[in-house]
Amino acid sequence: MAKPAFSAHSLENLLDRNFPARGPLWQLAEGQESRAFAFDVAGEQFVVRVNRQVQGFEVDRLVHAVLPGSGIAVPEVTAILPLDDQWVCVSRRCPGETLQSLPADGAYAYGPAVARTLDQLAGVDAVLLERLGASPLFGSLGCWPDFVRAVAELEWRGVSPGLARQIHQWTDLIVQHVPRLPPVLGLVHGDFGSNNVLVQDGAISAVLDWSEARIGDPQYDVANILFWRSWLPCMEQQARYFEAEEPGVLRDQARLRCYQLRIGLAVLSDALADGDAHLAEWAAGRLADITAER
């Protein structure tokens, strides 16, 4: 999905009206769908994100409200504001740098901290999960097996006959595994790792951007690390950590393969829709590699 385009002047005016004592804006590293900036107010730092959709920002606000005391640091959303036909989210800036910004082999040292955070996500209290599920933001997402199976309903226009056959094969593997998914539910971030995880002094200082979060199987976040390992060095380092230090996390290879294929088909569909030939080619190759690992 293309990042939002907007008038810098309109954004500055919006922030001036809501934060009259703010300092100048400066740009931050961005995700796939949002534009990101920061500013100071009386020595306190804030992050500004602009997106076409408001729902992800509302999920961020909900998760912060529900998770205090869970051990997972989530930035506090202080304002969600309309900007023409787009949305602006202002949140408090957490300390640290992203896993993706570390040196090529830097993420390996944060493997224990990553593992602890994934355990915390998997172990979110049932009462808190019920509070999340009671919100329309989560309650409308459907059950976990339906989410996994949903890639079977994607439409593939204009793909070559060879790729169409591969897509059919990958989809069949997912659908065949869905009945074997265990009834193990926790909080799934949905896009864990890289730019959505801040680290500092050997610990995870915050987990960002909960727009893909849902109640489901926490192994999905492990699968996300594995899927992206050949695309991002920080994901490769995290995957190597689990393989070397905590192989038990990876013991259910069939389930992790199912989830990686599900992630890959969604990435391939989005890349083709966006005309991103490089990402589409990589995703198709990654899906083939994952299938060959069986």
Image: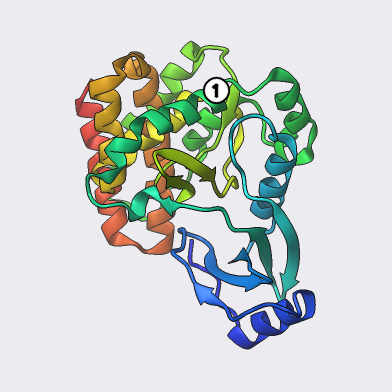
Give the left or right position of residue 177, taking residue 103 as reference: right
- Name the residue at 60% across, 29% down: 187
In the image, residue 190 sits, relative to residue 180, either above or below, namely below
- Name the residue at 74% across, 58% down: 78
Secondary structure, mark 1, is helix
> Does residue 164 show up?
no
- Name the residue at 64% across, 58% down: 92
Q: Nearer the viewer, residue 137 or 125?
A: 125
In the image, residue 90 sits, relative to residue 194, either above or below, namely below
Q: Nearer the viewer, residue 9 or 256?
A: 9
Q: Nearer the viewer, residue 102 or 144?
A: 102
Where in the figure is residue 290, as x and y percent of width and height?
A: 26, 31
Where in the figure is residue 235, as x and y percent of width and height?
A: 31, 41
Q: Quadrant of residue 124?
A: top right
> Does residue 277 show up?
yes
Give the left or right position of residue 34, taking residue 283 as reference: right
Where in the figure is residue 144, as x and y percent of width and height?
A: 59, 25
- Name the residue at 53% across, 43% down: 207
Q: Quadrant of residue 239?
A: top left
Q: Quadrant of residue 135?
A: top right
How crowded is the residue under tag 1: few (<14 C-alpha within 10 Å), some, or many (20+)?
Answer: many
Q: Amino acid at mark 1?
A: Ala
Where in the figure is residue 269, as x and y percent of width and height?
A: 42, 49
The total of numbered circles placed on residues is 1
Name the residue carrying label 1: 122
Give the left or right position of residue 288, taking residue 89 as reference: left
Give the quarter of the figure containing the C terminus.
Answer: top left
In the image, residue 247 sits, relative to residue 26, either above or below, namely above
Looking at the picture, the colour scheme in use is rainbow
